[in-house]
Amino acid sequence: MNPPGLEDLLTLLRFPSVSTSSAHRDDTRACALWLQNRLTTLGLTADLHETPGHPILVAKNKHLPGRRTVLLYGHYDVQPAEPLNEWLTPAFEPTIRDGRIYCRGATDNKGQLMAHVQGLTETLAQHSDLPVNLTILFEGEEEIGSPNLKPFLEAHRDLLACDVVAISDTGMVAPGVGTFTYGLRGIACLEAKVRGPSIDLHSGIFGGAIANPCTMAARLAASLHDPEGRVLIPGFYDDVRPLQDWERTAWQTLGDGDAETLALTGSPALFGEPGYTERERRWARPTAEVNGIGGGYQGEGSKTVIGKEAFIKLSFRLVPDQDPAKILAAAEAHLRAQLPPVVSLDIHLGHTGQPYLMDPHSTLGQAAQRALTKTFGGQIALIREGGSIPIVQAFADVLHAPTPLLGLALPDCQAHAPNENFPIENFIAGTRLNQYLLEELA
Amino acid sequence: MNPPGLEDLLTLLRFPSVSTSSAHRDDTRACALWLQNRLTTLGLTADLHETPGHPILVAKNKHLPGRRTVLLYGHYDVQPAEPLNEWLTPAFEPTIRDGRIYCRGATDNKGQLMAHVQGLTETLAQHSDLPVNLTILFEGEEEIGSPNLKPFLEAHRDLLACDVVAISDTGMVAPGVGTFTYGLRGIACLEAKVRGPSIDLHSGIFGGAIANPCTMAARLAASLHDPEGRVLIPGFYDDVRPLQDWERTAWQTLGDGDAETLALTGSPALFGEPGYTERERRWARPTAEVNGIGGGYQGEGSKTVIGKEAFIKLSFRLVPDQDPAKILAAAEAHLRAQLPPVVSLDIHLGHTGQPYLMDPHSTLGQAAQRALTKTFGGQIALIREGGSIPIVQAFADVLHAPTPLLGLALPDCQAHAPNENFPIENFIAGTRLNQYLLEELA
């Protein structure tokens, strides 16, 4: 017997709402329309707001004077599902195995989003109202950096005014351990394309006399780090806020992070910036990563060509007080300095998001901790996370509201990777968490 | 009105005989069968010999005592046609524009091969016999390094015994200039695959704590050259035979190579080993080229992953007296020394071919020069080429026969690249060259 709300989640997962892909534009819109209808059936007023990209869904109960206003945020878009051949079951056909739902978006973010919707459903069924004024804000562009959400916040400050923002789009340190994320890394993306000859060339006929774009792109990627893993872009670490002692101590109590990361990733070894633990590197230190590199022949066997162009796709994960625009400018200058003028270099600056940090010991932070304790019992983990939710900083900047992040994803939920999944028990716990959270925040 | 034999060439071009692709295995065989039939109609005995790969076609006229025996070599396989979207007309549908035939294989090698077949056709129509004992040897694996041809030569020394080998699979320095290629570079190929995590990872959650295979693959590629373009593999240049003074002088009379290569390639600038001219770099100096690099996200937009693996495909062009096996061993050792044990490295050694050099002033060399003069008139260009035809060295080793290379390709025929083409006038000239060559060699 499926728990209440599970069928709705499976329906939501079947929409291939890949926001970065123009081919999935209609699917993404259909996903938003389905959610609008779902919220309307709860008695909420739900409006779809058009943007230059994917629509934003805003829904409310009847706001009464004298109640706290809570804004509940989630996103209905997902990452691309590629490489498709590594999925054990189809990426957009949710499949339940061993108590987990496997589907692109299962954990990031549709499973967590629908746990909140189901919590609201149950509270409304019991009490006919919620203990707070609720504003729901679901967007469809989180996986491409939420380019239209901050302008939307700025244009609708009154519509979205709130005391606190609640989001479940982060992780739990272990099954059953309530986890409060008080910091996130920011992000800045960049794509560099190296162009050489105007056509692909025979590497025998021309090899040796002109620059090879693959080699030059490799030089760019290889120039980003020293052999030990420190980022070599001049000024990259200038604005990094040092870790606090209480954080380093608290994180050491969370178990063996090294063993966990080795097991989760299947990597042969850990590797990273010297002087920091594995958790500190992931949660509180900035990175430069090559998300993709490509050029020349990609197929089976060999082809003796010099490809006319090659690319690298980079993303930087940032921590307080790094500024994404400043980092991108420094990265661009660094990359341009690497190459002699024997190839041309096009640099496209991509999306950015500020890093985020709140005080978990504030009044609202304590209310969120109580809701976690009621839901999960035991000790609450206070952590930061390595991922980026740029909009969290936007809520702080525009709505002046703090955002306790109460995640429901487990470390092996494979967000962004093949065989993404979400445990059904976390869906049920998330339903309860929503109910306790609104009570505590009230 | 099409010249005689052109329709046959167009038919041959329509076979997508891509030897490296298992998907085109049947097409490649069909191509061989068509050629077998075409040679049979000339009154030759034509037999298809099976190999572990693609078949070898051997055809002969009636060999008479007291005549020179000429072995005519060509290959019916072609390079992959990718990237398909850069072809102006379909890669395997021959299309004539401005006097040139556009199709994969038009110049390399089907156009040149069929010019010889048409020359034989016309001589036989006029004289009912050829002036020499002819053995035709057409293979289907030249573009993948002819793995089965040398064993075939060794197993059929009597069948293939000859005084001289004739091949048209090289270039002309300019339209109408008869060109004798007396040297070729050898080749050695290698693919390296870097493997890190067992799955693609979220670069926010895990970035900073493990090694990124894309970064490590880029390090490998970037480690191959110094900033000026010299190869950094230890021992790489040890066995390189220096250029002769007469060659350097002769090549300087061939016109402005720098301007020609810039125009042909569309590169922003020349780039290569200091101390050598552009032609010397291409014809008589060894290279290391990255033919392909890939890892992580390859699609539109951004995807914030750490890919689980990345690859580089390398080829080395070699000159006398470098040994391909020794170079591959040195390259493998160099690559393994670049990476810390935080990723695993699989190295697959690919096909190899010896470099080749003959004396263009020998008796047979002079006969070949006379055939070129009769066909084209004017001064003959004596050159080396940068490409590799490993089998030429095998003919020297096994059959003890020299191989004058009398090419028909122009520098802008785009061999191995999109929009490969072959001028119809070169097809006609090649038909005459075949007839004069057999007369002179007789």
Image (tube, coloured by chain):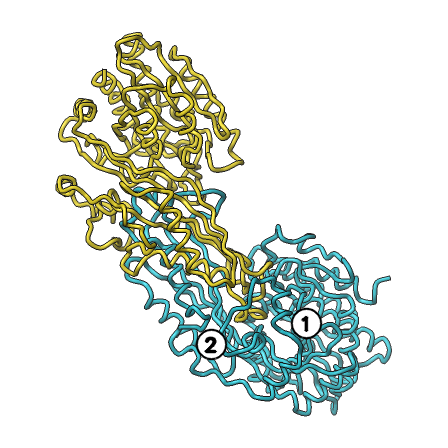
Chain colours: A cyan, B yellow
Q: Chain of mark 1?
A: A
How many angstroms separate mark 1 from mark 2 (CA)? 32 Å
The disc at residue A47 is 1
Q: Are marks 1 and 2 on the same chain?
A: yes
Element class at badge 1: strand
Q: Nearer the viewer, residue A440 or B43?
A: B43
In the displayed structure image, the side of residue A63 where residue B429 appears, left or right: left
Q: Position of residue B18 (x, y in %)?
A: 46, 35
Please tell me which residue lies in front, A118 or B406: B406
Quadrant the N terminus of chain B occupies: top left
Question: For the residue carrying disc 1, how many other residues have a C-alpha within 10 Å: few (<14), some (14-19), or many (20+)?
Answer: some
- Using the rendered image of the protein, determine whether residue B439 is visible from the camera's viewpoint: yes
Residue B1 in view here: no
| Label 2 environment density (alpha carbons within 10 Å; few <14, some 14–19, many ≥20) | many
Task: Please report the residue visible at 27 percent of the width from the left and 34 percent of the height from the top.
Answer: B171
Three-letter amino acid code at the position of disc 2:
Pro
Residue A429 placement (x, y as % from top left): 78, 73
Examine the rendered structure and indicate whether residue B435 appears above or below residue B28.
above
> Which of the numbered marks, if any, corresponds to residue A324?
2
The residue depicted at 45 percent of the width and 73 percent of the height is A230
Q: Secondary structure at mark 2?
A: helix
